[in-house]
Amino acid sequence: MLAQRAGRARLGAQSERVVQLLAQMPQFASYASAREVAERAGVNVSTVVRAAQQLGFEGWTDLRGTLRAEYLGSLVTTGAERPASSDAAARMLRQDAANLAAAASPANVEAVRSVAEAIRSARRTVVVTTGSGTGPGQILCYLASIYGYDVQLAAGPATTQAVSVSQMDERDCLVVLNVWRLTRALRSLTRLGRENGTTVAVLTDLRSSPLSADADHVVLTPIEGIAASPSLTAMSAVVQAILAELESTPTRASLGRVEQAWEELGLMDEQA
């Protein structure tokens, strides 16, 4: 669809860049805002709107609606219509390798260190997220707690999460994990943390995420996959990098106490 319309339009270099991005990332494009597309394409918002108009749409919202219909339609094709997926595993591994390389930029590594220091210095840390972000969030909370840090996952509905965040203050750290689409609840919880004076750290795939306005530290976690679902590999790796920074002599002492408790309670199968 994009190729046909682009063939009939006279696009400049920047508009071409926008169209190429939309073709390469249909999942992202079907829900993203014009600002998010501009961020990914390295252009300004007006270029995204102009590209949509050059393709024959009223603006970005009109184009996005068409892209969404095309994308969702592609997900419900019959088995005979689907392209061969024998190399899906290899393509996914290559995509994750690219995501990890992007996450390992010098600026990102420095941001990871800052998040770890915020957790280390905090009285307690609360992690909030939605959907698939719960997986990396649980990893952070579980292992950090074994290391001796008070890190808790605020799970459940937004009303329950709000209780945890509302009780935080300048002595605490709020870690926000945003995977793909941003919910109003997560946006409001982040703002609440900022208003309470809490140190706010955000893990997101967008450099210009709305959450950045309320964040002290932002770590980029690319989530590009090869199908309908985002990849959590880079976000999980960033969580592991934060945990690596948190390791210290007191951490090893706490881990030793935990292992001793496991042994005393007979929780481990020694024959395994």
Image (tube, rainbow, N blue to C red):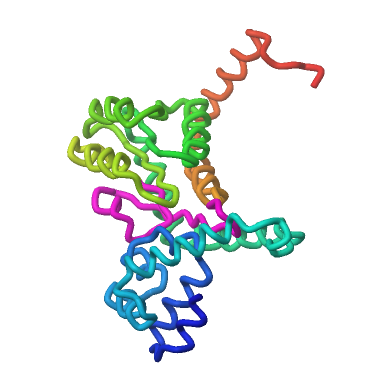
Q: Find residue 125 and report its horizontal and vertical position in percent.
A: 36, 32
Residue sitting nearer the eye, 141 or 11: 11
Q: Quadrant of residue 160?
A: top left
Q: Find residue 213 and report its horizontal and vertical position in percent.
A: 24, 53
- Specify the farthest residue to the top: 265
Whether residue 78 appears in magenta in the rendering, the answer is no
Q: Quadrant of residue 17?
A: bottom left
Which residue lies at the image location 50% right of the left edge and 48% below the top edge? Answer: 235
Which residue lies at the image location 54% right of the left edge and 48% below the top edge? Answer: 232
Q: Is residue 133 visible?
A: yes
Whether residue 227 appears in magenta in the rendering, the answer is yes
- Specify the farthest residue to the right: 271
In-image side of 266 versus 19 (left or right): right
Q: Find residue 33 and report its horizontal and vertical position in percent.
A: 33, 62
Q: Find residue 162 and report its horizontal and vertical position in percent.
A: 28, 30
Residues drawn in magenta: 202-230
Against 53, is 151 above or below? above
Q: Is residue 151 visible?
A: no
Which residue lies at the image location 58% right of the left edge and 22% below the top edge? Answer: 256
In-image side of 166 versus 22 (left or right): left
